[in-house]
């Protein structure tokens, strides 16, 4: 079955770049959208954006100026980069497969703290 | 952006209770609408997609209904493992927004 394994640092300094990777196993990355969602502590889920396997992106306008998503089909990976992070970006970040229109398979989550 | 408003924000219920959670969209979204269950320390789990379709492996006590702007998630008989936060989400347009969540607690 398809599984998503997330990786990336748990601590990022203010003003630096957050980089997370989601490695897909048990299936191909092709022909799917792959999304990112985050949850700050004590708050709800926030949709960050999505990327199709061809590289077409769809970002949340509230974050669009700071985020870049990419795919590496050779490695079956999806990546998220967020620049100029601040304490407000401290959250648990999730990647997920968009099957049909819903996010049907999720990564385990990565807790990212922004702190000096 | 399409706003999703869930009600109630939280509720207390007992095992065996019937629970209903509502979600209202700020504009019509047809059936581009989904429900997720989220427990602390775990990834969200898709329960219902396309407003009323049960995701594979999800118990049949979960049902979704609605179309347009008003949607409902019903748990017919609450089990101990159902205590969690439930979120609705729309995929009609971008950004794909979530509701603010409904926390289901043990009475």
Image (cartoon, rainbow, N blue to C red):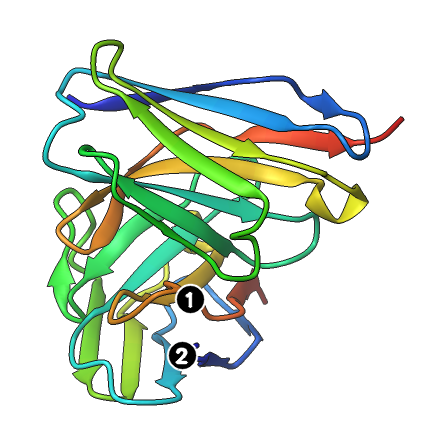
Residue displayed at 75% across by 49% down? A88
Relative to residue B42, is residue A58 depicted above or below? below
Tell me, yes or no, whether the two marked residues, 2 and 1, touch with CB atoms within 8 Å: yes
Residue B75 rendering spot, x and y as whole percentages: 30, 68
Relative to residue A23, is residue B86 depicted above or below? below
Residue highlighted by disc 2:
B2
Residue B52 rendering spot, x and y as whole percentages: 14, 70
Residue displayed at 19% across by 60% down? B49
Instruction: Give the structural element (helix, strand or loop) at label 1.
Output: loop
**Residue pushed farthest top?**
A75
Instruction: Give the structural element (helix, strand or loop) at label 2.
Output: loop
Relative to residue A67, is residue A53 depicted above or below? above
Which chain contains the residue that carries disc 2? Answer: B
Q: Nearer the viewer, residue B49 or B103?
A: B49
* Cα distance between the residues tagged 2 and 1: 7 Å
At label 1, counting other C-alpha atoms closer than 10 Å, the crowd grade (few under 14, some 14-19, many 20 or more) is: many
Q: Nearer the viewer, residue A1 or A66?
A: A66
Left/right of residue B83 with respect to residue B46 in the rendered view: right
Which chain contains the residue that carries disc 1? Answer: B
- Can I make out residue B84 in this image? no
Q: Nearer the viewer, residue B16 or B82?
A: B82
Residue A106 rendering spot, x and y as whole percentages: 34, 35
Residue displayed at 67% across by 30% down? A112
**Residue B36's quadrant in the figure?**
bottom left
At label 2, counting other C-alpha atoms closer than 10 Å, the crowd grade (few under 14, some 14-19, many 20 or more) is: some
Circle count: 2
């Amino acid at each position: 079955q398809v599984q998503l394994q997330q990786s990336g640092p748990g601590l990022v300094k203010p003003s630096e770049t957050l980089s997370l990777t989601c490695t897909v196993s048990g299936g191909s990355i092709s022909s799917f959208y792959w999304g990112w969602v985050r949850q700050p502590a004590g708050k709800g889920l926030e949709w960050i954006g999505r990327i199709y396997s061809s590289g077409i992106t769809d970002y949340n306008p509230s974050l669009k100026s700071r985020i870049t998503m990419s795919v590496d089909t050779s490695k079956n990976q999806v990546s998220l980069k967020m620049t100029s992070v601040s304490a407000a970006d401290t959250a648990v970040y999730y990647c997920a497969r968009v099957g049909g229109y819903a996010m049907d398979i999720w990564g385990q989550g990565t807790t990212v703290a922004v702190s000096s | 952006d399409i706003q999703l408003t869930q009600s109630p924000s939280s509720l207390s219920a007992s095992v065996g209770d019937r629970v209903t959670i509502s979600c209202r969209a700020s504009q019509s979204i047809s059936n581009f609408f989904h429900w997720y269950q989220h427990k602390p320390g775990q990834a969200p789990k898709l329960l219902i997609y396309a407003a009323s379709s049960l995701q594979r492996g999800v118990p049949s006590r979960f049902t979704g209904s609605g179309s347009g702007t008003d949607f409902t998630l019903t748990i017919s008989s609450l089990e101990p493992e159902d205590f969690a936060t439930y979120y609705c989400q729309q995929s009609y347009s971008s950004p794909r927004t979530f509701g603010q969540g409904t926390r289901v607690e043990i009475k």
